[in-house]
Image (tube, helix red, strand yellow):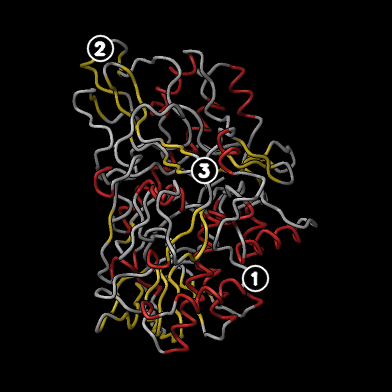
Amino acid sequence: MTLSNLYYYRKSSEKQNDRIIADLVIYGGTPAGITAAIQAKKMGLEVVITEFSSHLGGITASGLGATDFGAKEAIGGLSREFYSRLGNYYDKEEQWTFEPKAAQYVFQTWLEEYQIPIYYQQRLMEVTVEDKKIIQIIMENGNCFTGDYFIDASYEGDLMARAGISYYVGRESNETYKETYNGIQFGHPHHNFKTEVDPYKTEGEEQSGLLPGISEVTSNKKEVQGSGDKRIQAYNFRICLTKDPEKRVPFPKPPNYDPERFTLLLRYINGGVWDAMNLHVDLPNEKTDLNNYGGFSTDYIGMNYEWPEGSYETREDIYQDHLNYNLGLLYFLANDNRVPNHIQQEVAEWGLPKDEFQQTGNWPPQLYIRESRRMLADYIMTDRNCLGQTKVEDSIGLASYQMDSHHCRRVVMDGKIVNEGDVEIPISPYPISFRSVMPKATECTNLFVPVCLSSSHIAFGSIRMEPVFMILGQSVGTAVALAYKGNLTVQEVNYDKLKSTLIREGQVLEWDSSVVDDPVKRMQSTFGKE
């Protein structure tokens, strides 16, 4: 099998130079972009979606088939309808775990019902801003999209950034917003090493250098808990697997396979710990969603720092490096004779499903961008919102998953290998502010940002779940329609009118504390994480 996965490529022959005019132009065919488009179209606007890749549906349709929802009761509107439509696909009332191809089908047919056009392979090159309004966005292929309003629904916030809107990348210190769980975080118990492993290329010889996957040597004296830095939580691919012999493709050898990058994992296994593939969640039709688990797994820790602000070429390099790491991990475990035989046999029973991702060698096309840029708006969501210490009065939807940051780096600290940055703090559902999805009026007046919204690193760790992005997408789609009909800036949309419209559309804006199924208790008893 030949892998055909590319994040970015540029052809001189792909020039199109079309001019597309719409009331609303959405950059990003993610779940947030899709629900924003549907809602705006329902309210009478002409809408187009521009998508960087050839893939619709973001990570939801690229392997993340095990929905991390926190509390189902907090999910309403089009987000809840998505899971109802998946239920129809599987002849059930609702379906919360699903195959990637099922999500792709639901998104595609949903947009077709509303006759919303999608333009694929649209790589943003230039944004024209006049008098604090985006006039048009121009793509590398020459296509020009002109609109009255715009939504940046991308995982990276590229439109937001190119429009000159303030943003932040990395972990703020706890002092910045008077938080508790932001910044550098040592000492949290999850997804760390359970036994000591020698960190050096030649065991016992410090001068031989660190093993691949370990970034630096540090100490308690150097580290300040809660201090800020520019690091972000790890990315991976959410890998759809199957054991079905009729549907299974054996793991192919990746293009730039290097077994030595897994020496640390091999030593960990030989030290008595085998848990790298523990987090499989069952999906329909004998498939699973494989996610990160333990001290060394699918998270490629510390190798994504340049993604948020990187050029497309830089991102392509990072994408391929992650592909080689994730696929290489599976290939190594199934084929390297140094791996204990029982583990080789166990992993070799798995494979990539033949009926998924057929255009990309059965490998998921979307890298899991857990965190990138975050807008700096008039209101910034913080862990005080997540913990219920501060409550906003302009809710446009609820988040209900725990504060959840994956590790940001792997270091040698006082002679031991330590993963740093993981935070898992249970919370109850809480409202997200309308002000957090709109830029400051001094910067832009016709843009909403429902994905790279205004939030601290650790608060974003809770907000960033795909059902929430769909909720926020619908809410900003509603706000755009109200702004369009009233010839208003996004900042002039009346919240009370927005609120009443959202409630009519089925959005859940307040949490009913009488709900029996308390998400805090549920998450305290659950070890799996997004």
Element at badge 3?
loop
Toward the front, the furthest residue is: 514
Q: Quadrant of the N terminus?
A: top right
- Percent coordinates x, y for residue 163 in the rendering: 28, 72
Which amino acid type is shown beneath numbered disc 1?
A: Trp
Task: State the CA–CA distance, disc 3 to disc 2.
Answer: 37 Å
- Percent coordinates x, y for residue 25 in the rendering: 44, 78
Q: Are marks 3 and 2 in contact (CB under 8 Å)?
A: no
| Residue at screen point 37% across, 29% down | 419
Q: Is residue 180 left or right of residue 274?
A: left
Which label belongs to residue 205?
2
Which is more foreground, mark 2 or mark 1?
1
Vertical side of 397 occupied by 460: above or below? above
Residue pointed to by mark 3: 530
Vertical side of 295 occupied by 471: above or below? below
Disc with the residue nearer the chain's start (3 vs 2): 2
- Percent coordinates x, y for residue 142 in the rendering: 36, 78
Element at badge 2?
strand
